[in-house]
Image: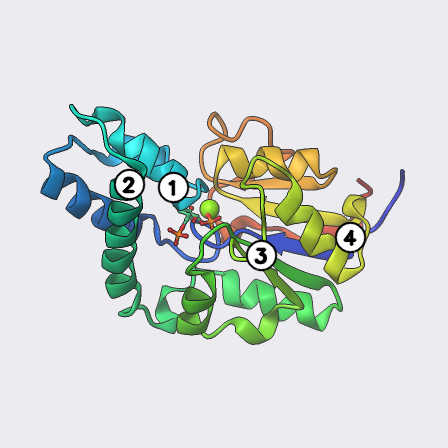
Amino acid sequence: MKSALKAVIFDLDGVLTDTAGYHYLAWRKVADELGIYFDERINERLKGVERMRSLEIVFERADRGFTDQEKRLWADKKNEYYKELIETMTPSKVAPGARELLITLKEKGIKTGLASVSKNAQTVIEKLQIKEFFDYMADATIIKQGKPDPEIFLTVADNLQVAAECCIGVEDAAAGIKAIKTAGMFAVGIGDPQVLSEADEVIASIVGFDLQKYIEMVF
Ligand code: B16
Ligand code: MG
């Protein structure tokens, strides 16, 4: 179907700001306290993955089992460490080019949405001072299925009252790209083309987001 761009839906962590480093430090503190091996490569697998599923990945290297209660306790601990870190965030932490893109989208009357699985998304958005740019924000507190399920992207499109085929989704995680494609949207990946092979297009950072090209494109 021929359609014009009516909305851009952004992931948060890794797209509009780089919080992966904070997630890494918080998980590493937990892993160190428990004597579990953890490194940057394992941290890569946590991108776009909700908290309890992330814990399962981090705990794969543990040499003992944990009860559900213990897992919840350690997930809470990780979140406390993470919250301490994001408390220090300032508007300078907005990814280069992101604020400018959000301003241009507003000027052109293209709607904007946020699709983050982070329960801390609101705090991060407030710290970055970019809340005013979003027409609708969905986050983990209102979504039942994590990415790669398309629920979060479809919920945002619904609330923006825009058909999925008129939306671009922007993501840094493979699971997020899958969610966008399953939702029937055009997927722009931020990062490594090999990791994000299911994306319609991959750019190195939001600076490379060619809005004019997407406006003229029929997808
Ligand atoms: P929290 P996104 C995701 O956010 C992160 O990429 C992922 O690393 C993190 O585990 C997840 O949020 C959950 O975060 O523990 O704060 O609820 O990329 O969907 O914006
Ligand atoms: Mg992300």
Q: Quadrant of residue 104?
A: bottom right
Q: Secondary structure at mark 2?
A: helix
Identity, as a three-letter code, of the amino acid under mark 1: Met
- In front of the other: label 2 or label 3? 2
Left/right placement of residue 25 relative to residue 1 reads left
Cβ–Cβ under 8 Å for marks 4 and 1: no
Labels 4 and 1: the sequence-earlier one: 4
**Mark 1 or 2 closer to N-term?**
1
Q: Earlier in the sequence, mark 4 or mark 3?
A: 4
Cα–Cα gap, marks 1 and 3: 16 Å
Task: Identify the residue position indicated by label 2 in the image.
Answer: 71
Circle 1 sits on which residue? 52
Amino acid type of the residue that numbered disc 4 sits on in the rendered structure: Leu
The amino acid beneath tag 2 is Lys
Q: Give the alpha-carbon distance from disc 2 to disc 3, as whole Å.
A: 22 Å
* Marks 1 and 3, the one that precedes in the sequence: 1
**Which residue in the protein does label 4 denote?**
5
**Dot 2: few (<14), some (14–19), or many (≥20) neighbours within 10 Å?**
some
